[in-house]
Structures are given as structure tokens and as C-alpha cells.
């Protein structure tokens, strides 16, 4: 199963955040939620508070989204 997550990102200044979209592959929604809590730059609020939306998507949307992630300089550490 493939999922699209809209997350609240941190490290952009005190009290500020930015919205980021990430794509995950997992067995179910709980597996994906657990993986996403260890994502760099995710706001660490109460359990799962930095995650705004989790939506199941198709394989094609997942592949397209992963390509967009690779081109996003904020999400890449290099």
C-alpha cells in the first residue's frame, strides 16, 4: 500500500513551520504512521501532532511523488 502524508515541518525559525508532502510505502496506515514519526524535520508535537493528513494513493502517484521529493532541496540532506 502507498500513502501520501502532509506533515508540518520545523527548523525554519522559532515558532514557524512549513508544510511538506512525503510519500511512504507500508503494510497499513499504522505502519506508515510509525515510520513517519522518525522523519527528519517533522515537528515533534504530541503523538502524531505534526502529521496533518494521511491518504492512501496509487502506485503511479507514489512514483511521481517520490520523484518530486528527490528534487525538493528542503527534503534532501545533501
Image: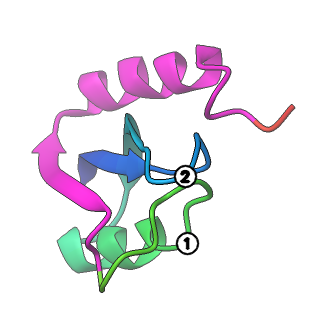
Judge from the rendering whether residue 19 lies leftward or rightward of residue 35; answer left or right.
Answer: left
Q: Is residue 33 above or below residue 14?
A: below
User: How far from the left and from the top, in percent, is residue 69?
Assistant: 53, 26
Q: Pointers 1 and 2 in contact (CB under 8 A)?
A: no
**Which residue occupies the extreme front position in the image?**
14
User: From mark 1 to mark 2, how far is it between C-alphas?
Assistant: 21 Å
In the image, the segment drawn in magenta is 48-76
Percent x, y for residue 56?
Answer: 13, 48
Determine crowd level at label 1: few under 14, some 14-19, many 20+ residues with C-alpha closer than 10 A: few
Image location of residue 57, percent across then percent down: 16, 38
Marking on residue 14: 2
Left of 8 or right of it: where is 10? right
Q: Where 76 falls versus 56 (above or below)? A: above
Q: Secondary structure at mark 2?
A: loop
Answer whether residue 50 is magenta in the image: yes
Q: Is residue 26 left or right of residue 57?
A: right
Q: How is the image coloured?
A: rainbow
Amino acid at each position: 500500500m502507498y500513502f501520501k502524508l502532509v506533515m508540518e515541518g520545523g527548523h525554519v525559525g522559532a515558532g514557524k513551520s512549513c508544510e511538506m508532502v512525503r510519500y511512504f510505502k507500508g503494510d497499513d496506515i499504522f505502519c506508515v504512521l510509525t515510520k513517519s514519526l522518525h522523519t527528519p524535520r517533522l515537528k515533534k508535537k504530541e503523538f502524531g501532532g505534526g502529521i496533518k493528513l494521511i491518504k492512501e494513493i496509487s502506485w503511479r502517484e507514489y512514483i511521481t511523488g517520490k520523484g518530486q521529493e528527490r528534487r525538493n532541496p528542503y527534503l534532501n540532506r545533501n
